[in-house]
């Protein structure tokens, strides 16, 4: 039994311009201790899918239309608000993209890092303060106990992300969801933060869901990868397998457009066309209009993620038919 | 024209921006209602001498104050004057003060703000410090002193109110100009060798127009309120002229016996303020989609 | 912080000097003197009166004399109430105005914050539209319309409350509501806007992701930032509550400072006008200063500056 099992998750946004199908039937599972990468362009639904799990999608306009998310005997999508609160920030924690805006500028770092302990474990302020200092120390914040009374604006970007991680890890969660944790940071700091997450993961034995648009990060950190496009998972595979032999045309195109995949002087590859407008009804494979391998079948038939080899699935109809 | 390049670009963007705003404004029902009401009021005010059912000063002492009825929709006062007619005439003055005094404040505020924002540096901080200090002054009190000591004529009223209400406008325009100053099309205008005056008048101020329109719409009700306040204290418009503030003042004195004398002018004033405020809010939503997100 | 406060205090001195000078010359340069209107006074007495009140001296002399007295806190005798000094008039009138202002502020804060915050928590629903429509009404119905209407309904028709006066607690209800209504409306709009702005911030999502209860998210994480606009409004609001009380004190016949000021203005009571203006200005400056300090305390990012 997997630690977290998501089945057929659909999250729609009901806007004035129409219903935006941000997440359209996503299923995946997370095993204990593993690192799962979710890759996709912005707007592919990867963040919304994770927000849906913790009930962080603003409602209205967002609404979870269907699906289940089994975690420790409860369904995160259908449980009561109290049950969900008992999970989030305690058993499943989250680190966000921009540490500049994700910390409350009006509260001290200490207050914010201590808060999960005060709320979930009923610790006294003294105990909480001690553990906050220890946790901040473990994520590499120098002079942690002195800096508890500082405010976020007194920290650098990298240090703030460390604070975010400390805040997420202080309750020793079973799953850490990291939503583009390094995108807003300097390149030199990115590697440090990833190494830190990896190290703390091993120490605590937790699972990590790493949401990113950067294949380079996936290659370095993740055990397994889901590739998302237009609110659906189009391919899933073990990281090594995926890099050695990408099967879905979208995955291939995405990898080809990475700057590092090119020899010096070679022209960069770009995927033709634009991602589809999710407010419009779609038939066939959502990638078909941009796909160089698309045939009639792709434009008409419905797609589904189908296992094509052990531990490996693809939503491409031609891959499933053995044509690609 | 020498500035053909950047100007046409801006013009195109401008047109679609205004059309877009107009579309958004029309979708906002309270704002549309406010606009319609306001246009009606202005038309009625302009046509008052021809459409008013009675003469403004015609008295009928024998009749005295009567309740609203078929002949006198809003009743009459103790002198037998038709309240509906008096509200129509009072509205002319109230609207006139509203628009003229706002015009004065607009002129001062836009020029002051534009110069301050455009000059930047020392002059800017000095001018804005001045605005800060003026903000701290009890201005209503100064207007009262001004009105008491220098007679109570209409032109002075425009000036006094206009001189009070320009501060926020100056701040808004200055902020706009400052942020626009470094945009590409302004730099382009520089490289084309346009004079400072021309850049300020032709490029900076037109592009700051959205917030100026919004705030002007919101200044008019404030000005009308201040006029009514002064008239209520007996310092604004003087009889035999009348404004809504003055009608309310007269009505309050006898409201126990003739409540309609205060209720109808009060409704007239409040409805107009409602219309202007809804229109202003709607314009803000329409012209500044970013601020309207809430 | 102490340096910041001292700096602000020192800044107010030139501002006050500008106000004194402006009022002084504005009042003196106006046509007509304080005793011109009194008919049954001979030329001789008028000259004596002018002499007594130092009105025959050259203008600059009068100005320096006034400043000299001012430094000692002496605002001079009231021209029209010869038995009382301006200090006495203010001393008698201000406590009443202050009391009225405080009640009105309580009304404004209680109603305004409750309406604004609850609207922000359920945006674009009935619980948002209803209080916000009321707020718009509060802004569009001026206090000199609202006051008489309240009197008409609650005092004259229903006879629940007295028409005017300022002795019994029941007499203070209608004035406080009349004066506070507009400010309640502004506070409701400002707190709604501020809370909505803050509630859409990333750090609120962080707080929710930590598993905090909605009450804790609002009270601990959103309120401090969301009420900033309200705090900065309190300075102008305090000023407005004081000058707005002219009308309310007139309607309800309350013996406050506002009424003395308006009477003084009509009577050309130079010293009383100057004294009250100066007093109001000082109060307003103090309020603005207090607001700045409060804001610096609430927003740690401003504290350093």
Image (tube, coloured by chain):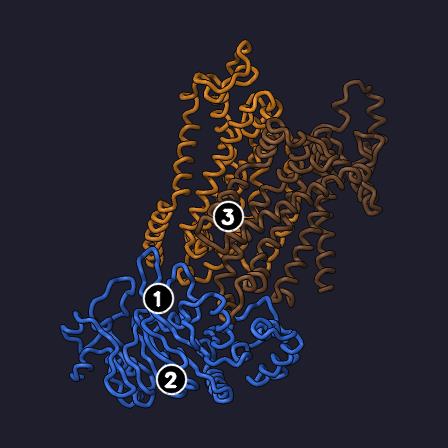
Chain displayed in orange? B
Q: Residue at x 56, y 58 (%)?
A: C226
Q: Position of residue A229 (x, y in %)?
A: 30, 74
Nearer to me, B68 or C272: B68
Per the image, the residue denoted by label 3 is B110
Is circle 2 on the same chain as circle 3?
no
State the mark number for residue C184.
none
State whether residue A153 appears in this view: no
User: Regarding mark 2 in the picture, which secondary structure is present there?
Assistant: helix
Q: Are dots 2 and 1 in contact, CB under 8 Å?
A: no
Depth check: give the residue in front, C175 or A150: C175
Residue B64, picture quadrant: top right
Q: Which chain is brown?
A: C
Q: Which mark is residue A218?
A: 2
In the rendered structure, which disc, 2 or 1, sits on the residue that comes first in sequence?
1
Extreme residue in the top direction: B62
């Amino acid at each position: 039994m997997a630690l977290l099992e998501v089945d057929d998750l659909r999250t729609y946004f009901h806007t004035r311009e129409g219903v935006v199908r941000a997440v359209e039937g996503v299923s995946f599972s997370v095993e204990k201790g593993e690192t799962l990468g979710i890759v996709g362009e912005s707007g592919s639904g990867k963040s919304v899918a994770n927000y849906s799990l913790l009930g962080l999608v603003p409602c209205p306009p967002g609404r979870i239309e269907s699906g289940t998310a089994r975690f420790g005997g409860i369904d995160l999508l259908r449980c009561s608000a109290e049950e969900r609160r008992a999970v989030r920030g305690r058993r499943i924690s989250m680190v966000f993209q921009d540490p500049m805006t994700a910390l409350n500028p009006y509260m001290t770092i200490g207050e914010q890092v201590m808060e999960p302990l005060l709320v979930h474990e009923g610790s006294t302020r003294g105990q909480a303060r001690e553990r906050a200092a220890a946790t901040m120390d473990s994520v590499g914040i120098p002079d942690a106990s002195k800096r508890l009374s500082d405010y976020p604006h007194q920290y650098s970007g990298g240090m703030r992300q460390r604070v975010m991680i400390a805040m997420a890890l202080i309750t020793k969660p079973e799953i850490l969801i990291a939503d583009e944790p390094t995108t807003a940071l300097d390149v030199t700091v990115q590697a440090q933060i990833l190494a830190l997450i990896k190290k703390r993961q091993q120490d605590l034995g937790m699972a990590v869901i790493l949401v990113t648009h950067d294949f380079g990060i996936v290659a370095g950190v993740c055990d397994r990868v889901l590739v998302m496009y237009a609110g659906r998972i189009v391919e899933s595979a073990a990281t090594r397998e995926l890099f050695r032999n990408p099967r879905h045309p979208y995955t291939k195109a995405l990898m080809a457009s990475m700057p590092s995949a090119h020899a010096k002087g070679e022209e960069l590859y770009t995927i033709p066309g634009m991602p589809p407008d999710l407010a419009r009804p779609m038939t066939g494979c959502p990638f078909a209009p941009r796909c160089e391998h698309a045939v009639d079948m792709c434009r008409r038939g419905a797609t589904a993620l189908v296992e094509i080899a052990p531990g490996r699935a693809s939503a491409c109809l031609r891959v499933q038919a053995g044509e690609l | 024209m020498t500035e053909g390049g950047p100007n046409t670009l801006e013009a195109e963007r401008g047109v679609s921006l205004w059309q877009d705003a107009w579309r958004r404004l029309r979708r906002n029902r309270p704002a549309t209602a406010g606009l319609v009401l306001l246009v009606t009021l202005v038309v009625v005010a302009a046509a008052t001498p021809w459409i008013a059912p009675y003469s403004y000063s015609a008295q009928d002492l024998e009749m005295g104050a009567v309740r609203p009825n078929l002949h006198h929709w809003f009743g009459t006062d103790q002198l037998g004057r038709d309240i509906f007619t008096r509200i129509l005439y009072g509205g002319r003055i109230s609207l006139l003060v509203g628009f003229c005094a706002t015009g004065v404040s607009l002129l001062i505020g836009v020029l002051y703000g534009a110069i301050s924002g455009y000059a930047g540096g020392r002059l800017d901080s000095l001018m804005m410090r001045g605005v800060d200090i003026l903000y701290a002054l009890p201005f209503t009190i100064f207007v009262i002193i001004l009105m008491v000591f220098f007679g109570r004529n209409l032109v002075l009223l425009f000036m006094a109110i206009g001189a009070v209400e320009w501060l926020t406008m100056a701040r808004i325009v200055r902020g706009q100009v400052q942020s626009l100053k470094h945009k590409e099309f302004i730099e382009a205008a520089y490289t084309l060798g346009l004079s400072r005056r021309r850049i300020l008048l032709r490029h900076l101020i037109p592009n700051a127009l959205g917030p100026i329109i919004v705030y002007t719409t919101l200044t008019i009700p404030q000005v009308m309120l201040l006029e009514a306040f002064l008239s209520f204290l007996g310092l604004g418009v003087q009889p035999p002229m009348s404004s809504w503030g003055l009608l309310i003042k007269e009505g309050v004195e006898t409201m126990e016996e003739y409540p309609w004398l205060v209720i109808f002018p009060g409704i007239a004033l409040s409805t107009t303020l409602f219309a202007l405020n809804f229109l202003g809010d709607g314009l803000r939503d329409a012209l500044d989609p970013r601020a309207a997100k809430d | 912080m102490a340096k910041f406060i001292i700096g602000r205090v020192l800044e107010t001195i030139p501002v006050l000097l500008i106000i004194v000078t402006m009022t002084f010359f504005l009042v003196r340069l106006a046509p007509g003197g304080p005793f011109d209107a009194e008919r049954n006074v001979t030329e001789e007495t008028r000259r004596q009166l002018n002499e007594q009140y130092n009105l025959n001296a050259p203008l600059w002399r009068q100005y320096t004399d006034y400043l000299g007295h001012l430094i000692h806190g002496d605002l001079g005798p009231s021209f029209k109430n010869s038995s009382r000094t301006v200090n006495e008039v203010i001393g008698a009138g201000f406590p009443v105005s202050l009391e009225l202002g405080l009640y009105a502020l309580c009304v404004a804060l209680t109603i305004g914050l409750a309406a604004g915050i609850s609207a922000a928590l359920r945006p674009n629903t009935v619980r948002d539209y209803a209080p916000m429509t009321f707020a718009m009404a509060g802004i569009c119905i001026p206090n000199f319309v609202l006051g008489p209407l309240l009197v008409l309904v609650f005092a004259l028709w229903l006879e629940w409350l007295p028409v005017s006066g300022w002795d019994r607690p029941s007499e203070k209800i209608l004035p406080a509501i009349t004066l506070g209504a507009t400010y309640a409306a502004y506070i409701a709009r400002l707190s709604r806007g501020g809370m909505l702005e803050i509630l859409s911030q990333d750090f609120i999502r962080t707080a929710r992701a930590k598993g905090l209860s909605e009450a804790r998210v609002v009270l601990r994480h959103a309120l401090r930032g969301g009420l900033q606009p309200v705090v900065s409004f309190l300075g102008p609001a305090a000023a407005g509550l004081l000058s707005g009380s002219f009308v309310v004190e007139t309607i309800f016949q309350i013996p406050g400072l506002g009424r003395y000021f308006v009477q003084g203005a009509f009577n050309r009571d130079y010293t009383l006008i100057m004294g009250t203006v100066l007093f109001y200005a000082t109060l307003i400056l103090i309020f603005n200063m207090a607001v700045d300090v409060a804001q610096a305390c609430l927003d740690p990012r401003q504290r350093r500056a």
